[in-house]
Image: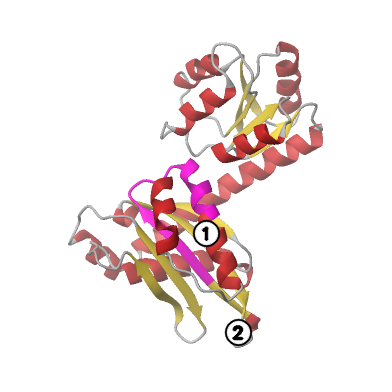
Amino acid sequence: MKPLLMVIDDNVDLLWNIKLMLENNNYRVIDAKNGKDALNKLKNLDSPPDLFICDIMMPEMDGYEFFELVLNNDKWSNIPFIFLTAKTSPEDIRFGKVLGVDDYITKPFNEKDLLAIISGKLLRKKMNISINKKINKLFYNSDDLTEKITSNQGQDDVVFLFVIWDDTIGPKLAFYYPENIEFSYSIEEIGTQLFHSISSIYGEKNINKAQGFLLTIENINKQGYIYFDSYYDKDARGGERRYMLALIDSKIKIISTFKIKECFNEISTLIKNDNAWKIEDYWEKLIGSL
């Protein structure tokens, strides 16, 4: 089935032109004249759209307010969101990025650029869905892990994992934080399984640049933001040492992943430059992002 896009703009002529362009490029389109109109139409859909394209300055409910409502709804919060707007000041763009918008496209826009961004966002969404399915399938095939989890269900706190690839034994849990609390599942098993799962899906050689994923780990009823990168190490196979940073909690909203990624980018830079770092220095910011 063709992807379903929702386009929100109070400019009737522009809305019609965008809808026509998208339909001519094999997309289904629902249009709305403002955020309030979009919410009413969303409630009547059997399934949510695959992507939002939204103007900012609109009557009754502007793009920012609509975006915040989308983020706070579990059915819509993981849908890619693109702002299409005439607001071009650096402050406006920074605000959109802080909110967690996938892209911020200014009017007038190039048709090919918009189509390329839409295609890229939909492809990434499809990949994330595929990764989630494959990872949970691999987890379910781990009988030892399933037994450990189902035998001791409970409410656990947020946990950070740092896993490094060892050429002899494979993924190795370097440490986790906090260390002074007990979990109803094996932290080491979760860390190594996540690393193995991503490696099997992407291929070990392809984990050589920063990339992050929001995953649902059904076995333990948790979500995790998983961040992979690598650094030069002459003693490692191929000269690259791969590693994984992960934050696991009962619920991680999509907007939280942007702030988590900022922290992980900073930590990753320190790791690559062989500088000392402590997760305690980032813990308050990480917890505050959830």
Q: Which residue position holds label 1? A: 264
Mark 2 or 1: the one toward you: 1
Quadrant of image for the N terminus: top right
Residue 77 % position (x, y): 47, 36
Residue 21 lies in the magenta stretch:
no
Which one is in front, 41 or 256?
256
Q: Is residue 203 visible?
A: no
Amino acid, disc 1: Phe
Residue 231 % position (x, y): 61, 74
Would residue 17 be found to the left or right of residue 212 on screen?
Answer: right
Q: Do the residues bearing badges 2 and 1 touch, measured as CB atoms within 8 Å? A: no
Which residue is painted at 64% across and 38% down in the image? Answer: 94
As displayed, is residue 215 above or below residue 205?
A: above
Q: In which quarter of the image is residue 224?
A: bottom left
Residue 256 lies in the magenta stretch:
yes
Amino acid, disc 2: Arg
Q: Which residue position holds label 2? A: 237
As displayed, is residue 12 above or below residue 284?
A: above
Which residue is painted at 63% across and 42% down in the image? Answer: 121
Looking at this rendering, what residue extends furthest in the left direction? 151
Would residue 176 be found to the left or right of residue 67 on screen?
Answer: left
Q: In which quarter of the image is residue 204?
A: bottom right
Q: Residues within 10 Å of mark 1 (few under 14, many from 20)?
A: many
**How far is mark 2 from mark 1, CA to CA?**
24 Å
Which residue is painted at 34% across and 71% down in the image? Answer: 188
Secondary structure of the residue carrying tag 2 is helix
Q: First in sequence, mark 2 or 1: give its number.
A: 2
Magenta residues? Answer: 243-262
Q: In which quarter of the image is residue 112?
A: top right
Residue 62 % position (x, y): 57, 19
Residue 55 % position (x, y): 65, 23
